[in-house]
Image (tube, grey):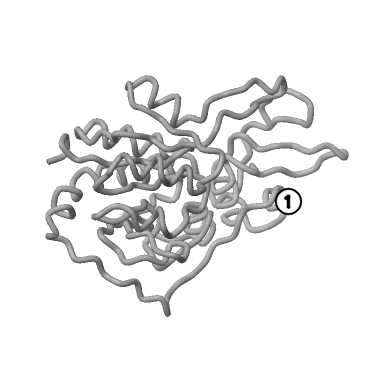
Amino acid sequence: MQNKLNFIFFGTSEEAVYALEAMHKKGLIPSLIVTAQDAPVGRHQVLTAPLAKQWAEKNFISTFQPKKIDDEAINIIKEKSADIFIVVGYGKILPQKLIDLPKHKTLNIHTSLLPLYRGPTPVQGPILNGDKETGISIIVVDSDVDHGPIVSQEKYIISGNETEPELTKILFTRGGEILAEILPEWIKGNITPTEQDHSKATFTQKLKKEDGLIDLNDDALENYRKFRAYADWPRTFFFKDGKRMIITEAKLEDKKFVIKKIIPEGGKEINY
């Protein structure tokens, strides 16, 4: 069933690659990856392919990079006659007429126990709030963000030390594995999705650079949670002698927030 499944994967980011790699290991290979266009990256603005495209090229999978999802792009995708679409970290909102194309719908990996933590930062939210668990939700995409019925859901127990990048990799990798496990039964019609309890929905917000500013006199546990949640971006920082100090390594020891390494503004990483 898996090798014969004709599906299109919409994804751009590192999160998409985690899911793709997990599915690939289980024998689930997309017929096409729809991803963002190449873009300038770094100080020298070198034109660079998105991570999902780089992964596709290594695995000899075709890609499609529309500038926008307009009628022309939709017609090209429609010609592929896919059984199902999978969306992970694509970065663009898909129009309803595209979502509705495949016979077996469009599915998405969301890294929280929906309806909790809808929105753009579902991995950071549980870390910041000190939750004991989070999880993965596979949902049917509908017209609202993270709103569709749940096809599969699995809990993950948070140790209390994972940083956001570590937890993101764990959850999206497991999400890809779950997709590989359930898709044959989903295609057969043996799984009935469950509507979310929308009355219990909570929401996350897009991060801002200033969110990473911490006061070293604040509660140690709260600062450690911020360090973990913002480890990728915006990173936690404080100011010393008017210079921004970015914290790159820290621990919670004896109920104290202990900074191990920092990068002074314009400098290189040093022990603190």
Q: Nearer the viewer, residue 145 or 257?
A: 145
Which residue is depicted at the point 47% across and 56% down?
95
Residue topped by disc 1 = 210
Question: Around disc 1, counting alpha carbons within 10 Å, would you say few (fewer than 14), some (14 to 19), or many (20 or more)?
Answer: few
Query: Residue 260: which quarter of the image?
Result: top right
Which residue is depicted at the point 29% across and 56% down?
105
Q: Nearer the viewer, residue 105 or 118?
A: 105
Which residue is depicted at the point 41% across and 45% down?
75
Residue 82 shows in the view:
yes
Image location (x, y in percent) of residue 109: 36, 51
Q: Residue furthest bottom?
A: 199
Q: Nearer the viewer, residue 32 or 175?
A: 32
Please identify the quadrant where the C terminus is shown. top right
Q: Residue furthest right?
A: 242
Which residue is depicted at the point 53% across and 54% down?
121
Name the residue type under label 1: Glu
* Above/below status of 127 relative to 181: below
- Please give left or right for residue 159 compared with residue 28 in the image: right
Image location (x, y in percent) of residue 204: 54, 62
Q: Nearer the viewer, residue 226 or 116?
A: 116
Please identify the quadrant where the N terminus is shown. top left
